[in-house]
Each structure stands twice: as C-alpha cells, then as structure tokens.
Image: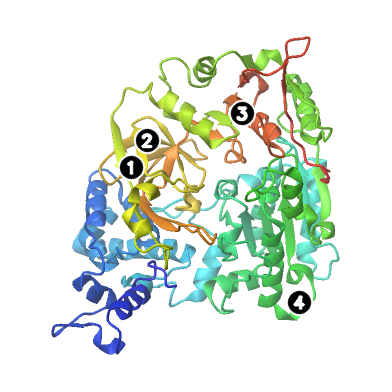
Amino acid sequence: TVSPREPERFALYVLTRHFPGDPDHLRNINGTVCDTFADAARMRGLFEDNSVWEKTLKEASNSLLPSQMRSLFVNILIHGSTQNCVIDSLSLWEMFKEHMIDKRNCTDAVKLRRIDRALAIIERYLFANGKQMKDYRLPLPSNSLTDDPNKAVDEFFFPTHLNDDDVDETVDTSFEKAKLNPEQENFYKLVLDAVMDPNSKNRLFFLSGDGGTGKTFLLNFLLFNLRRLGNKILATASTGIASTKFYAGGMTLHSAFRLGINNEPDRIPSIPFQSYFGRRIIESNLIIVDEITMLEKTVLENVDKLCRIMVPKNQHLPFAGKVVIISGDWKQSLPVVKNSRSPEAQVAVCLQSSNLYSMFEKTRLTQNMRLQPSEIQFKEWLYKLGTDTSGDKIAIPKSMIVESKEELIEFVFDKGFDIPSSDMLKRLMLTPLNKSVDLNNSIVLSSFNTVSMDYYSIDKCTNENPLSPYAADSDVAALNKLTPSGIPAHHLHLKVGSIIVLLRNLNTSKSLCNGIRLIVKQLQTNLISAETICGSNTGMTIGISRVCNSYVDERPDGVSFERFQFPVREAFAMTITKAQGQTCERLGIDLSDEPFAHGQLYTALSRATNSKFIRVFAPNKPKDEDGNVLINNVVARGLTFD
C-alpha cells in the first residue's frame, strides 16, 4: 500500500492501476507531457484539485501572522492528503509565499532573504516530521539541511530556535540558578556518573514520585545541564501532551523511534543508518521516556531491540549501552487493552510485566516541593487510594460532593461563563466514559450565545475488497455514524469561546499536540482559529485546517475508512484517561458512571492543584454514616508502587 502522503509514488500507483503499461508514458496526456505523475493524475481526473487548500490558506491569510501561516502550510502538506486529493504543494507555495513572510520594510533584496528564511523554517518543520522539501517539490533554502545532514542532527540535539518561528532565541536558561533538594541531587549524580562514564554498570533508571515532588523539574534540569556538557539526548514521552513538559526538544517516543501504531513484538521499523532519524538514534547517549505507565511493554522492548540493531557493536547490552531514564506514576492509568476492562489484562501488557523493568534502578521522590500544610492530609489520602488493592469502596468527602450536574457545571465554569481565556483552560470536567463526555460538552456548549459553525466530514471507505461490492461506499451514512477513538466526529458543532482539544500531533515543539486544549477564537468555512496558553502564559493563536483522519479496523469484517475533518472535539469535559498528564485549578468529576479501570479515580482526583477546588457528582451512590459518598476504586493487583 502506498500512502497519499507520498504524492509522486501515490500518483504513480493510482495511474498504473487505471492505465496499466509502461510508466514512462503515464505523464503523456494526449501529447502533453506533465512534469510529475501527480499532475498527470490530476489531468486525468483521478485526483481532486487543491481548491479546498487554496480556500483554507486564503481565509488564513486575512487573519494569521506569517509564522502562523507557515505552520498551517506545513500541517496541510503533512496531514492533508487523502486518497482523492494529493496536494500541489509548489502551486500553494507560489500562491501564498508572500503571506508567509513579514512584508514590513520589505525591499526586493530583503524580500528574497525573508523568503529564503521562510523556506528554511518550513524545511525544519518537515525534517521534524521525517519529510524533506523534495517530497513536496518545494525549492531548497540556502544552507539547506538536506545539503548538510550534520547541521540537521546538531540542530536537533542542541536546539537554539525551539518554540519560536520568526526570531531565533536561546533555550531556557533558568536552570543555571536552580537548586536541587537532596533526593533530586542524588538522582542527578547517578545519571551524570552513568552518562560521563561509558563503563558504568548502572545505566537504566526509573524515576517516580507523587505530584509536586519535582519529577518534571528534575528531568528538565538534567536535560539542560547534560546538553550543556555536549551530551545528545532524546527527550520523549508516551503522549504528545506529556512531551510538551520538556523545556526544549520534547517529542513522542513513537516519533523519535519511528514506531507504528501497532505494538506487536518484534515489529521493528527499518531505519537507514545514515538517515536523519537513524543518526539521531545512533548518536544519542541518553534517552528519556516520561509517562511510562501508559505504554505497552512491547513498545519499550521494541525500542531496546531497535537500539541494538542501530548500534551493532553494543548489541549485547540493553538499549545498546545507552543511558535510559523512564519516569511515571504507577498509581495512574495503565495501557488501554482492546476489548477488555480487566485490570489484570492491563498489568499483563504494562512495562512492569517485561523482563526489562527489573533492570532499572528505582528512585522515588518523596519530598514535596509545593505542598501547603493544609494539603498534606489530602495527598496522604490520595496515595492510599492509589495503592489500595483491597477492592473496597473509597469514601469521597461530603465537602467535595454536589447534588446535581448543573451544580457541578456551575462550580467549574461559573454562572454566565464570563471567564477570560487564560482561566477557561484551567477548568476541567472529567468522567470515565465518552458518552458522558459528549453529554456534558453538549450541556455546557448550549449555554454559549456566540457565533457557531457546523462542520461535516467527507468519509470514504478504504477497504481494498469490501465484503459486498460498493456496500461501504454506497452507505456513507453508516460511515458518518462511526466515531472511533481518536477520530473526530462526522458532525462538529462549534462556537466561538468554546474549549476544544486537538486529536493530532500538529507541532509538538509549539505544544500543538494530541490532548492540548484550545479556545476557539474564530470560525470560518475552511479554518478554525484557536488560542492556547503557552508556558509563558502568552496567548498563541493557531490556524487549524481539515486533515485526513485514517481509521483501520483489522477485524475480518471490519470497515476501514478515511474521514476528512478538523482534528478536534469539544473539551469542556474529557475522559479521565485523556486527561492524564494535565493539571487544572478547578475540577469537576462526573461519576454518574463509576471508574472501571486501574488508576482512574486516583488520576481524576490528582488533576487539581488544590483539593479545595474539586467537586464530585456521584448520583445514586451509597453513603457512609458521615455522609461521604462511596465509590468503586479499581487498583490492579500485581503492581509495585515504589
């Protein structure tokens, strides 16, 4: 199978299917020789035209800054192609390149330099996604990364331009003056000794600790100081949202090691040794993986095998002798197991069930850096809740309980919803099941009296051989009703001022990743403009276009399809699992449906920065003699927590 995200190869594939024969003649259409196979496919009517992208970029050019236009352009290139619409990248660039540069004080000579710089930034974005300018027939900038692979690798390991676009800034230097407590200092020295001494025996480390003990701070301290010593580090996490916590250069583990969606044993990606991604793996001497508890064990096992393949001289050593830090909290959610809610099944596929786990030296941080005296009792209660395998119900204090869903919503979002954008994203409702998420989002959204827009997807069956001819294609309505996990709905009803969540990793260096919540600022026919709050609390506006969302159902009778839709959903409320790694200042938990998987109750209650701002709605649940509500607490047996 050839992906439509490889325009030339996909065009050749489509042309040969419809016109078998000599490929050399496929670009000749009635005597006109096309420059590319994609042009030939377009002339033969096999590809849709680029009008949707022209309209999208036209709408964007009226409101977005040049840096935002460049980011949107790259996202269209990477995520926009469908089976019937391969993007004419060069035409779009020529049409809109002047909107991707700063046109102030722009003489002809300055304009050429700014266009070259825009191309360099676009190339950097593409490189980060495993793509090159030639893949899209785009002109190369001067000093192209393609011509200087050493520069590309060095820029990755020692970033000086992350989280910026127009101006090159140095990375955060606040860690120069940072102080570690004794626990953190001990762990830092363990890792430093391992990195600086290639013959050290202890090279695998597991870091755990409750919220507030400084795990993220310590990992960033390590990143900053070890990079300054010239070490090459792969800073990764199991999810996009977790990877944004790194001060620079964070990415998902799957992206760093080119792992596919399927986590099958021994399914190792083939990566050329001298490629950009191959060199990153080979040359790295420290790998960090945060939020490890949500990863299936086969993922890290395959990373281990891939490292040994890429560094054959060290293939007898775990991870080819590289120093590896994994971090997480086993009281939180474990991997999701298809077709099973069994905690035992979750334990069986998590990292603690791998032979690798016993090789890691364990460090648990216990000194809480930000805990107020009034919160100590709550944190102790949370720890007991998160490690209690007895199966007993947990008493939620009656001070946290509200008696209606309306009261819960009013507590979280305040009456009238007159809340600044920066505060809206600090408020969150959680619930175990998607059906409750949809209901709560609908209730909250109905209270907004702002401009709205309805967006409908284009769905197309991608099964090579449908069980009954044309069945899936003819019954598009059946596809429209499907909303698999991670796929946006066929019908999106959005309003200005509402909260949405991204369902795709668009640009992790700018925290635009799966799970990030945004405020809708403007709704247009082909573009959603939204704002997020970065680490500096500065509002950042982004343009979101439609993308190709692919769903593959591997069951014999399953239907696979493409959905052309904006990769977002409403996010006043989220599932507990989706919220792992996020924190908020005001939290509402809807337990109309009780927790059913390991760590859900702990994960939900630990999202708030202060227990005073947690409220729980748990209708029709038993109470103890003190009026506290009793809730199921699922904690898997067979895990160790320290």
For the residue marked with disc 3, what is the amino acid? Answer: Asp
Task: Report the disc number at residue 251.
Answer: none
Find out whether the residues at labels 3 and 2 contact each other: C-beta distance under 8 Å: no
For the residue marked with disc 2, what is the amino acid? Answer: Val
Give the residue displayed 54% in from the left and 18% down from the top: 408
Q: Which is more foreground, mark 3 or mark 4?
A: 3
- Residue holding disc 2: 520
Q: As displayed, is residue 372 above or below residue 558?
A: above
Point out the tag, 2 or 1, that comes first from the N-terminus.
2
Residue at the extreme top: 626
Q: As displayed, is residue 361 above or below residue 463?
A: above
Task: Report the disc number at residue 314.
Answer: 4
For the residue marked with disc 4, what is the amino acid? Answer: Asn
Find out whether the residues at labels 2 and 1 contact each other: C-beta distance under 8 Å: yes
Q: CA distance from mark 1 to mark 4?
A: 49 Å
- Residue holding disc 1: 528
Say if residue 13 shows up in the picture: yes
